[in-house]
Amino acid sequence: MDTNRTNTSTTDTAGATAGARGTTGTSTTATADAGGTAANVAAPGGGEAGTAGAAPRLDMIGMVTGDMAAALAFYRRLGLDVPEGVEDQDHVEAVGPGGVRVAWDSEELIASITPDGEPSGEGRVSLAFLCDGPEGVDRTYAELTAAGHPGEKEPWDAFWGQRYALVRDPDGNTVSLFAPLG
């Protein structure tokens, strides 16, 4: 299987790194090279540079993970269509709502490309997931915490008019669950 694809993004460090290793891209299917170094699912046109003078657009949200399998299982529970069988890869991508890619890079991959050889910080990204109404916030929070993921703040009715809750993914990243009130 030919998995060599190109990445033309100038704002996607993790994707560019994966591109240097032979995969990134514009495919809509999961792939892995013969060495098993990456698995990607990218939106059509993902990572393409914009026209001259155009503002950059959000293309990918990247996370560093110490446990790829646990991270992918967590985000599958939140509805991301993460390919199966890629838990041993260094780089994995899924297409999120609106075509924005969500990517996970192993700590080992990031350590190989950072100057000091260490990924920095705990809780290195935060994502927010819109739930199906206030009861969806409560239900999703209960499902995630029952599965062993730490609850940071139980569901509450926030002053800005949303039902809101905070949980932590397997790498300590804060994940917001929210829905408009009434």
Image (cartoon, rainbow, N blue to C red):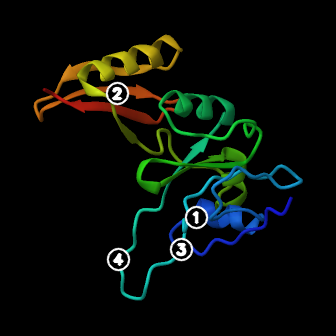
How crowded pointer 2 is (Cα within 10 Å; few <14, some 14-19, many 20+) is rated as many
From the image, tell me which residue sits under label 1.
Answer: 13
Residue 171 seen in render:
no
Q: Nearer the viewer, mark 2 or mark 4?
A: 4
Question: x and y percent of residue 142 in the render?
Answer: 40, 13
Find residue 55 and name its label. Answer: 4
Q: Secondary structure at mark 4?
A: loop
Circles 1, 3 touching at the beta carbon (< 8 Å): no
Circles 3, 2 touching at the beta carbon (< 8 Å): no
From the image, tell me which residue sits under label 3.
Answer: 48
How crowded pointer 1 is (Cα within 10 Å; few <14, some 14-19, many 20+) is rated as few
Side (left or right) of 143 relative to 37: left
Q: Amino acid at mark 2?
A: Leu
Real-space Cα distance between discs 4 and 3?
13 Å
Q: Nearer the viewer, mark 4 or mark 3?
A: 3
Residue at point 40%, 41% (across, down): 127
Q: Nearer the viewer, mark 4 or mark 1?
A: 4
Q: Secondary structure at mark 1?
A: helix
From the image, tell me which residue sits under label 2.
Answer: 166
Q: Nearer the viewer, mark 1 or mark 3?
A: 3
Question: x and y percent of residue 52 in the render?
Answer: 42, 88
Q: Amino acid at mark 3?
A: Glu
Most distant residue in the right direction: 34
Q: Amino acid at mark 4?
A: Ala
Q: Is residue 79 above or below residue 17?
A: above
Q: Secondary structure at mark 3?
A: loop
Residue at point 65%, 57% (across, down): 116
